[in-house]
Amino acid sequence: MFQQKVRPHLTYPEMVSVTGGYPWESGSQFDRLNLLAVELGLRTAEWCPGVGTVLGEKLSGFDLLSHTGAADHSVGWDTGSSGRHRRPGGRAPHRRGGPASTGASFEAKVERWAKLLAKHRLADSGIVVVFVVAPRPDKHVQVKEVAVAVRKAVAKATRAYPGVNFDRTADRMFVAERTSWFPEPRHVDRSFLTLAAYKPSGPADQL
């Protein structure tokens, strides 16, 4: 679709700004995930004064974000059979985040992020992670219940991979609720301007 209908109408600079100079690829993700991520990225770029750049998924692999130039095989994100780097998921403003769902695969993803952050110092990578809980509008799901489950998964992972005392993993993994940032259509809460979010720090019974 892109190559046939969009690419012929773009100048070279426009094409590079859209693709980052990488080959165009189509994925199997649901459109909802992509639309939510793009919308959040655009709102972040427009309204959050502390954010200098918003990156799409193609430029959000850990190898690029960490300036290592290579995949980190120790955390389970490496080169698959297709020869392309598998990406942890989500998109990147100055922090990476994306609509989250709970379950075994989600908990495994959270654990891999915690392991990665514990291994790579903030001063070297500049990476922190935000999981954004975004409920489906066509399903009656209690956002608070899902957010609690996500926070528990993050807290569990940070206990398993705590990092070091001067660079704790718990200080670099966050959970936010999209409905808290955007409580109603055409409304934005002031907490979004600073990307306020929960993190599993503090006493064990009062994270």
Image (cartoon, helix red, strand yellow):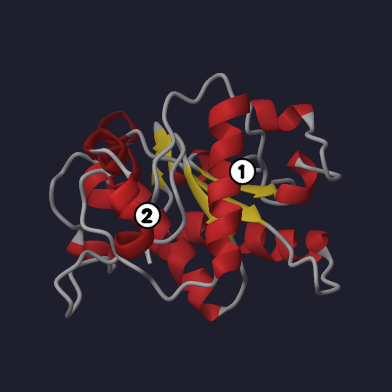
Q: What's the residue at 48%, 41% (across, down)?
A: 172
Give the x, y percent position of residue 146.
73, 65
Distance from Cα at disc 1 to Cα at disc 2: 41 Å
Badge 2 element: helix
Give the x, y percent position of residue 117.
36, 48
Asked if 194 appears above or below 146 in the picture, the reply is above
Could you say which is closer to the camera, residue 182 or residue 113? 182
Could you say which is closer to the camera, residue 42 or residue 102? 42
Crowd around label 2: few <14 · some 14–19 · many ≥20 (10 Å): few
Residue designated by label 1: 199
Quarter the N terminus occupies: bottom left
Q: Quadrant of residue 168?
A: top left
Left or right: where 184 falls relative to 2: right
Give the x, y percent position of residue 30.
54, 72
The amino acid marked with disc number 2 is: Val
Residue designated by label 2: 6
Q: Which comes sooner in the sequence, label 1 or label 2?
A: 2
